[in-house]
Image: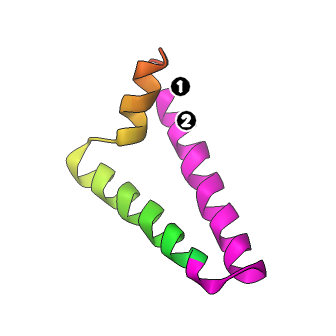
Amino acid sequence: MKTRIIHIVAGAFILISLILAVKVNINWLWFTAFVGANLFQSGITKWCLMGVILEKFGIKD
């Protein structure tokens, strides 16, 4: 469940930042890069800040 929520949130952030980059300002692509870097880091270290936050809200795997 937790992994599914993380994927949904990351995908939504990427799509929203791409829309904002096209419609508002190209600098929103930095947010897209930030999300991608966090996904990369999470895959390497197996640690995810969003996972920690979701656990504090009582959401388990």
Q: Nearer the viewer, residue 34 or 42?
A: 34
Q: Position of residue 51 (x, y in %)?
A: 40, 33
- Note whether 51 is above or below 32 in the view shown: above
Type of amino acid at the residue the image marks with label 1: Met
Element assignment for label 2:
helix
Image check: 15 left or right of 1? right
Contact? badges 2 and 1 (CB < 8 Å): yes
- Figure quadrant of the C terminus: top left
Q: Is residue 40 magenta?
A: no
Element assignment for label 1:
loop
Q: Position of residue 18 (x, y in %)?
A: 66, 72
Q: Position of residue 43 (x, y in %)?
A: 31, 52
Residue, far top: 58
Residue at image position (62%, 85%) is 26
The residue labelled by disc 1 is 1
The residue labelled by disc 2 is 4
Type of amino acid at the residue the image marks with label 2: Arg
Measure how far apart labels 2 and 1 are at the Cα level. 5 Å
- Note whether 44 is above or below 60 in the view shown: below
Image check: 21 left or right of 2? right
Image check: 22 left or right of 60? right
Classify residue 55 by image quadrant. Answer: top left
Residues in magenta, as a range: 1-27
* Residue neighbourhood size for the residue with mark 2, other residues' Cα within 10 Å, grouped as few (<14), some (14–19), many (≥20): few
